[in-house]
Image: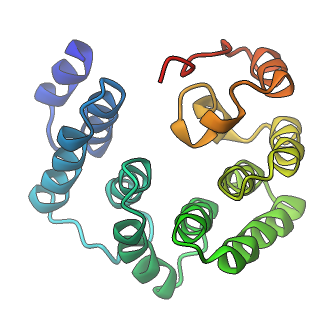
Amino acid sequence: MERSLYYFNKDRNVTGNWVGLSNSYFYAKEPKKALETMESAIQLLNTKYLSNENELVMNLAELKLLTQDYQGALEILKPMLESGAKYPRIYGYMGIAYTHLGLKENAIKYAKLLEGMADQTTLGSPAYFSAAIRVALNEPDEAMVMLERAVVNREVEMFWLGVIPIFDPLRTNPEFNRLLLKIGLKTGLRAEK
């Protein structure tokens, strides 16, 4: 936390410093401060919700998911999608939100879209985000297939696998823990809940 505050105070105009501080609050079990940090950043840096490539807005959507505000996440993500954004992260987060709102057919649509994208590119980590939707859908075998694919594809988002709560349902799965070790991450990082 101290390191995040140091970099944040060093230059508040750097988007990544706001994201780092927000993530630090979230993983220090202060989700309310994490959300407040992202909302403040968006206001102070004059960020628009309709921005296609905005790291702050995507981080806010992620925090809404992680704090189980699925409708709030969709309210951020839908305008981004409608503006023409075609990022795996948006599709993945929408699929997770739809699953938890009981709209599983929408979630499956996004999972399949991401699986098709994973056949063509690794940009944006489509296999990783498909796996995240499959976890939300309580399809652990399908999730593991996509995570293995993400490893083979060397998808960049895999570095979050050891800590992001989205994958908590897999933490007791020996296959998942072998995969964590395979990519150099520790097992059971979030097992304490």
Task: Name the image quarter holding residue 156.
Answer: top right
Query: 138 or 41, which is in the foreground?
Result: 138
**Residue that appears at 69% across and 50% down:** 125
x and y, in percent, of residue 92 in the image = 62, 61
Task: Name the image quarter holding residue 159.
Answer: top right
Query: 174 or 22, which is in the foreground?
Result: 174
Query: 24 or 123, which is in the foreground?
Result: 24
State the colouring used for the structure image: rainbow
Residue 104, compared with residue 66, is above or below; it is below
Q: Quadrant of the N terminus?
A: top left
x and y, in percent, of residue 8 in the image = 18, 30
Q: Is residue 80 left or right of residue 112?
A: left
**Residue that appears at 46% across and 86% down:** 83
x and y, in percent, of residue 151 in the image = 82, 35
x and y, in percent, of residue 149 in the image = 88, 44
**Residue that appears at 24% across and 32% down:** 30
**Residue that appears at 23% across and 50% down:** 38
Task: Name the image quarter holding residue 34.
Answer: top left
Q: Is residue 167 left or right of residue 183?
A: left
